[in-house]
Amino acid sequence: MYDSELVLEILRQIYQAAQTILKRFQPVKTVSDFVDSPAGMEKLDSLCMLL
């Protein structure tokens, strides 16, 4: 049987990660926003780590 508190904590973490991804993606309009600068690449890296 699963530990319900553990399941709830994991779901909270997934929800928080999804909210962070949505927030960080807001200013991105094209793929170029990620690949044309070191800052864009850093943003892409941080989003990938959350996934």
Image: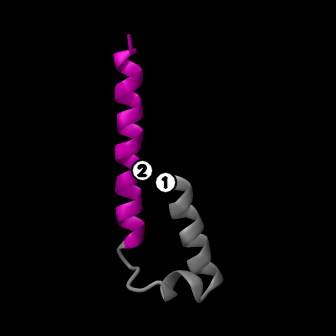
- At horizontal 35% and vertical 74% (from top left) the residue drawn is 26
- At horizontal 60% and vertical 76% (from top left) the residue drawn is 41
Under circle 1, the secondary element is loop
Could you tell me residue 21's position as x and y percent? 41, 61
Q: Residues within 10 Å of mark 2 (few under 14, many from 20)?
A: some
Could you tell me residue 51's position as x and y percent? 48, 54
C-beta proximity under 8 Å, tags 1 and 2 = yes
- At horizontal 56% and vertical 56% (from top left) the residue drawn is 49
Number of numbered labels in the structure image? 2
* Amino acid found under the numbered disc labelled 2: Ala
- Quick check: is 8 in the magenta stretch? yes
Could you tell me residue 43's position as x and y percent? 54, 71
Q: Which residue is mark 1?
A: 51
Q: Which residue is mark 2?
A: 17
Residue located farthest toward the front when viewing the structure as drawn = 1
Please provide the residue range marked out in magenta: 1-25
Q: Main secondary structure of the magenta part?
A: helix
